[in-house]
Amino acid sequence: MDNSKKSTSPKKNGGKKKKRKKKKNLVGIIFFVIFLVFIIGIGIVSFNLYSLYKLGGIKNSTGGAKTVVNIAVKTGTNPKEIARALKRAGIVDDANLFYLKAKKDGYCENFKAGEFELDTNMDYQQVVSILQNPSQIKGIKLLVKEGDTQEDIARTLNSIGIVSYDEFMSACNTISYDYPFLKNLPQDKARVNKLEGYLYPDTYYLSSEETGESIVNKLLSRFNELYTKDISEKAKALNLTTDEVVTIASIIEKEVKLPEEKPIVASVVYNRLKQGMKLQMDATVLYAKKQHTDRVLISDTEIESAYNTYFIDGLPVGPISNPSIDTIKAVVNPAKTDFIYYVVKDLSSGEHFFTGNYDEFLRAKENYVKVFN
C-alpha cells in the first residue's frame, strides 16, 4: 500500500505543474495580444497624426465637392484664432495641427489681415500662401450689422441690387429651412417676421446669381455654427428656450451699447420677470411702431402689439432684431444683481445708471433728462 502511494504522488505534482505552465502560457499570450493591439493602435494614430501634420491639418485636401469660403481676418487676430476660423469653415480638419505646422514653417508671423477667398479642396501650401497675400474677393459685399432687423437686411439687399426687398422677405417668411433651432419656434400669428433674430449679423460675399433663399441659408448657417451646445445647455439651466434667449438678446442688442453692461441688463430682465413686472423696454415699442425715433412718447407705449412690452406682460412674441453671439452669451451668463431699473446717463458712450430702488431711479431719470435737454 505504501509503495502504491509513493508511486502516485509524483504524477499528481506533475499534473499541477503542467496546469500552472499552461496558465502562464495563456496569460503570456493574452498580454502579447494586448501589447500587439496597443502597438498597432499607437502606430495608426501616429500615422494619422503624422499625415495630418505633414498636410498641415488638411486630411482631405483634394477630391469631393469644392466649396468656396470667404474669411475675413481682422488686424491683430491671433494665428490660433485664424486656424480655428479655417476649421469652422471646413478648410482644415485640425486647427491645432495647422497652427503648429504653420508656426514651425515660419508662416504664422506673415499672416496678414484682410479678406480671403479659399475653398475646401485647397492643400496646406495653397492656404498659407493665400493667408500671406490678401486679395480682393470677387463678389458683392453684404454687411449685416448687429441689431439689424429682417427688414433692414431686405432693404440693404435691395439697395445693392442682388435681390429685391420683396424676394428676401418672402424667402424669410414663406420658405421652410432645416435647422435645429427653427424646429420649435412658436407658431404665433402675431409674430411679424418668421426668422427675426436668426439672420446672423456678419460680413458676407455674394454672387450676382444669389437668390433670396440662398442668402437666407448663408445667414442661418452662420447662426447655427455659432449657437453652440454650451450656450444651449446654459439656456436650459436658466429654464429658457432658444427663442427666449434670442428674444432677450435682440432687446439688449438694441438697448445697450457697452459690452460690459449687457450681462447687467440681462439680470434686469430676469429680475423684472421674476417679480411679475412689465419689461417696459423702449426698443420693443419702436419695433411695434415700425419706425425709429429718438424719443418714445407716452402714446407710443400704448400701441397694442404683441411686441410692445409696455402693453404686454413678459417677453415679446419674438425677437426684435438680429443679435450678435456676444450678446447671446451675455443672456446665458447674466450678472448677479438686484437691479430693476436703468437710465442712460451718458448719451455719447451709452453708459447707464442702474438701481433696484424706484425713487432712486426717478431722481436719476430727472437729473439725466435735464442734462440731455
Image (cartoon, rainbow, N blue to C red):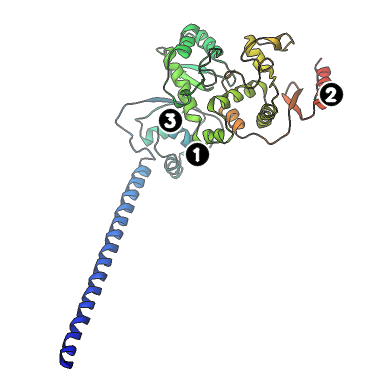
Nearer to the camera, 98 or 132: 98
Q: Alpha-carbon distance for marks 2 and 1?
A: 49 Å
Q: Alpha-carbon distance for marks 1 and 3?
A: 14 Å
Image side of residue 311 versus residue 161, left or right: right
Of the numbered discs 2 and 1, the one sitting upstream in the chain is: 1
Residue 298: x, y in percent? 74, 11
Nearer to the camera, 321 or 23: 23
Q: Alpha-carbon distance for marks 3 and 2?
A: 51 Å
Question: For mark 2, does the 10 Å Cα neighbourhood hold few (<14), some (14 to 19), or many (20 or more) residues?
Answer: few
Q: Secondary structure at mark 2?
A: helix
For residue 3, above or below residue 132: below
Residue 347: x, y in percent? 74, 21
- Asked if one can make out residue 8 in the rendered structure from this viewpoint, the answer is yes
Which amino acid type corresponds to the residue marked 1 in the rendered image?
Lys
Q: Secondary structure at mark 1?
A: helix
Q: Secondary structure at mark 3?
A: loop
Indicate which label's residue lies in the foreground, 3 or 2. Answer: 2
**Residue in the picture at 47% in, 27% down:** 224
Q: Which mark is residue 89?
A: 3
